[in-house]
Amino acid sequence: MLSTRKTVAATILGLTMVTASACSQGGSAATNNPNAEGGKTQAATAPMPAPFDAGEVHVAIVQNTGQGDYFQQYLNGTKLQAGALKMKLDVYDAQGDNATQASQLDQAIASGVKGIIVRHGYADTLCPGVNKALKAGIKVVIYDVEIQKCSPDAVQTQQSDAKMASLVLDQMATDIGQNKPVGYVNVLGIAPLDRRNVVWEQYKKTNTWTQKFFTGKYSSSTATDTAPMVYNALQANKDVVAIYAPYDELTKATLSALDQANMKDKVKVYGADISTADIELMTAAGSPWVATGATDPNAIGAAVTRVLALDLAGQLTTKNVEFPPILVTQTMLREKSIKNMDDLRAAEPSLNISDTASAPWIPAIKF
Amino acid sequence: MTQAVTNKTGQQAPQPKLIKQAAPASELTPLMRVQDAVVKYGFVAVTVLLFVYFAATEPAFATSDSLFAMLKYASVTAILGLGMTFSMVVGGMDMSIGSQAGLAVQMAAMTMVFYNMNGTTAGLVVVGVGILVGLVNAFLIVYCKIPDLLATLAMMFVIQGVKLIPVDGQSVSAGMVLRDGSVAPGKFTSTFLLLDRGTLGPVPLPVVIMLVLALVSWFFLSRTKWGRLMYAVGANPEAARLSGVRVGFYRGLAYVLTSTFASVGGLILVSRIGQGDVNAGSSSLLEAVAVALVGTSVLGAGKANAWGTLLGALLVGIVLTGLTMKGFQYYYQDTAKGLVLLVALVFSYTMSRKKVRYTPAT
């Protein structure tokens, strides 16, 4: 006979498999993210053109990483807009692993989708896949990968990083003036951060700021991994008056390092990106984060999906779409007592880009 | 073990008792027979069933494009898993395998981009460095007597850090600005990029490499004296030593082989990425361990083996591709990966009546 242990094991095994199969029978994996923003669907005023008039259009998003506030909101916008357009959206998430992203792009192509959104990653890695997809007649919309050189036919979209950096750095120059010791927290080799870096180099030179340190690490837990690096840099450079950290995970790391080093009142932090969590951090009592450049990732995620829809319908007239950012300051957030993204959208309607890349037949999502 | 082991003086050594003898067939109850069948064929059956299920419910799943994409995806994991199989056969585990793949990525990129060498040179440099790292691991484990897990854990951190020193922590890409302000002279050669992007007929090259390496591993482990002795060392190093087996040599050899496979896996990775990505390989360790462990349960082997590892990698590939097509997010996929491993472990550790030969040394 089977021993008790074996019987227990067999039961566990059986249950595991039942659970596993129960999951896969479930079909839809749509979950409600507690942080997800609702978004209102604006009614379309025209009938849908082909291929949208013939039922569900199968598309995919191949994203480099989905972790962090920004990317979660981005995907939320993408999902809502895809839903409103009755698209079946497959989500491929490489979790920051570039080789995996290349494989997932291959898989998306093989799965027979009509359109693909490629979000972040290396041009060198994604180029063969993107060209393969285009050759197979799949529409490809790229977000934030500089791929024009090798895939000129792909549609390029991005938020204007140069503008985002210059808005914030103008503010920084006004606040601290010239000839000051400053810190820099960034990671090079990632397209949007590289573009912000170019602007930083210019401002550093123009304002004769002395860069006392340059640190930062991009990983699956950027904020946690970067914080101790910034803390150590601060220990060695207690004279810095401002730090530029142009990505909100890096900005968070900088805030936590300043907190730990007890230097919150001495150093001003200039960041990038915005989310409800970021707004809380900026408006917290004694927060050193004074300015950030903002786009609404929800709105961008939705807008990129509309670009793909226009492309699928053969109505896209440009190969390059940019989404403009705005400057958000701590003073403004406090004066208008803005607590979350909804408040911010109400105060700054320009964040909502539901008119960008739209058409009468598209039920645009407004956040 | 059917092969007789001879000691130094040429006498027949007593057979080390590697596995608990199964009861003679006549004593087996029907339940035990079922249990044996489940242990032996359960895992293969799960793989086949999942494949059939996905193929039947997702029309795009079983297309040749999709299957080749899946095999290509699985190839690096499979190759690293095969590498891990060697160290697991001798009763150890190489924690540094992922960082070694990352090192290979960086070395290949530097050879071509910084020093403007061709792809073949890059390949030779990478495999050479891989063998060197394997020798260091072997030295630490065999000569310095540091337990496998601990030595390779330390090496994992060392390699992760060391590989970034010459590149100032940056990903190496063509046209980058070097320390002295000049622009890097080289780029990834098109021949080198073929390693991942090329095909042999309809079959992607990395899949061919994976299959060849699986065949080589199987032959080495099961059909050569060296391979058989590695299993003996892993099952009972003391018995192997008393039988005259040079235990240290075989353990060392296993780590050198692991590293060599890690460097080949890294070469495919870098060819896939097209840049010296600093994060490459960081997720590879756990995947390699997982597929090699899954492999121990295939056909009731109860020990790390080449075909088992390959099947493990394919099963993980099938599950991930299928779940993605069904619209599951990555965290469901991680859960599924974990469950696959768990089921495999239950097959081989709990349900099998055979003593499992793989137990980590520390």
Image (spheres, coloured by chain):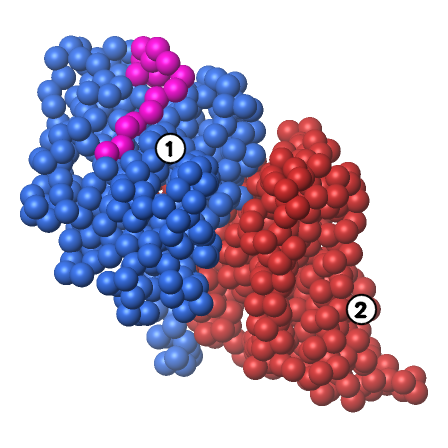
Chain colours: A blue, B red
* Residue B226 against residue A276 in the figure, above or below: below
Q: Is residue B73 left or right of residue A29?
A: right
Q: Is residue A11 left or right of residue B232?
A: left
Where is residue A190? Give x, y as percent: 47, 42
| Quadrant assignment for the N terminus of chain B | bottom right
| Residue in front for this viewpoint, A292 or B1 | A292
Residue A68 in view of the camera: no
Q: Which residues are magenta?
A: A310-326
Which amino acid, mark 1?
Ala
Q: Which residue is mark 1?
A: A162
| Residue in front for this viewpoint, A270 or B209 | A270
Where is residue A126? Give x, y as percent: 51, 33
Tell me the residue at 17%/13% (across/down).
A360
Where is residue A109? Give x, y as percent: 46, 29
Chain letter of the residue beneath label 1 in the structure image: A
C-alpha separation, residue under disc 2 versus residue under disc 1: 61 Å
Which amino acid, mark 2?
Trp
* Residue B93 against residue A128 in the figure, above or below: below
* Residue A142 against residue A36 in the figure, above or below: above
| Quadrant assignment for the C terminus of chain B | bottom right
Mark 1 crowd level (few <14, some 14–19, many ≥20, 10 Å Cα): some
Residue A238: say if magenta. Answer: no
* Residue A254 against residue B190 in the figure, above or below: below
Mark 2 crowd level (few <14, some 14–19, many ≥20, 10 Å Cα): some
Report if the CB atoms under discs 2 and 1 are less than 8 Å apart. Answer: no
Q: Which residue is mark 2?
A: B226
In the structure shown, which secondary structural element does the residue marked by tag 1 occupy? Answer: helix
